[in-house]
Amino acid sequence: MKLQPFQISDGYSKFINLTDTPNEYAGDSAKALIVKDTEDGLEFGTASGGALTDGYLRLTEKDTDPSSLSDTGNVYSKKVDGYSELYYMDNYGLITQLTNKSRVFIPTNELYTYPTNPHPQDDEFESTTLGSVWAEDFTASGSIDYDADFAAGNCRRQIHTDYEKSWYSIQPPYDSASKHLHRYYSMPTNVFIWARVKFERRHDTSVGDDDQIIGMALTDTSAGAPRWNSFIKVWLNEQDAGQSNVEVNFQYNSLDKGTYEGITANQQEQGFDYIGVHKVGTVYYVWVFNNVGQGLCLWNYDMPAPNFSIDRIVFMFKSSSTLFPGNYIAGIDFIRFVESATFLPGMHK
């Protein structure tokens, strides 16, 4: 028995021979078949919501969330701050954001995860070029080397390289001179500023005084550089007598307003990973956080009227010892800002 070709109505065996469909395929590769706006025929076009194109699932960006449907889950793309983000809605209408600016979105505390709503002044150090707002008061040259042992000369500095992605890394000479990375910042009434920092070094049996220091300061400005007439300094890794300490210094109009020092770790351990300053009106609170988000407010100071003009953020690096093989390496993962009188990263969620 010989089978006859399957035929569509009116005896046509080809789709393009129908009177209410496209009459050719040329130029319509990977397009979908959709109903015309006139609702009287079919045509090729881009399907609303999403389509498989060249092996890729492409979701058309929406401005709003869809309506929930019983026994149905929705995966869709929605515009957020100019970006096409991926979302999931379950049958009860509960929505989960899956991506945030090309990153997998994990809704945990903003102490260490990428912020949902980044501040315009945030810097994640994700470019090999230092941002134009920053200035260095040292010459940077050469590659970082754990075994490098040098008492003078330029700082070795790398940003977002294979050595360490998304980090500003610096290896200063052990000349006891503080090196600074700084930028101008007009302080609002309320703001929390925090940074993730660290130090790395070859192991040694002892730690001398001020072997390896990293810190952050808020200060006034003179000629585009730190003035140090009035400041708040937070030294995350200051050493005395074999101990690693957190040290806070306040100074107003060249007058010392006090120093706080607390032991955080023995020898070469790093007790805290984050340093921050919270400005609430004229009161400045100094915070440190460990790597699981536990915070400790070290000190606060209410600046007398008239409140001095803090308008510069400074990162400080200092090495003073030759007791170990290879100069220490300091790093900054990010600096972030939240303009709020109540925000505390790692403690508000």
Image (cartoon, rainbow, N blue to C red):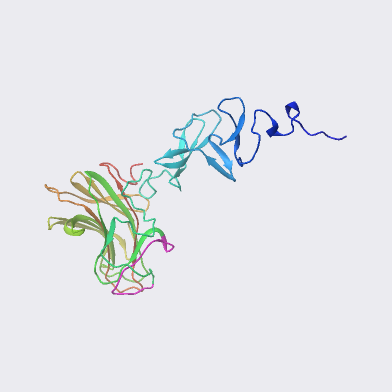
- The residue positioned farthest toward the right in the image shown: 1
Q: Is residue 101 above or below residue 240?
A: above
* Residue 69 image point, x, y percent: 53, 28
* Residue 237 image point, x, y percent: 29, 61
Residue in the picture at 19% in, 43% down: 281
Q: Is residue 111 above or below residue 47?
A: below
Which of the 4 image quarters holds residue 239? Answer: bottom left
Viewed as shown, does residue 20 lie left or right of 227? right
Residue in the picture at 29% in, 57% down: 134
- Give whichever of 181, 255 is nearer the camera: 181
Q: Main secondary structure of the magenta part?
A: loop
Is residue 268 visible to us here? no
Is residue 195 visible to us here? yes
Viewed as shown, does residue 15 lie left or right of 83? right
The span shown in magenta is: 147-164
Quadrant in which the C terminus appears: top left
Q: Is residue 64 magenta?
A: no
Q: Is residue 149 magenta?
A: yes
- Give whichever of 123, 72 is nearer the camera: 123
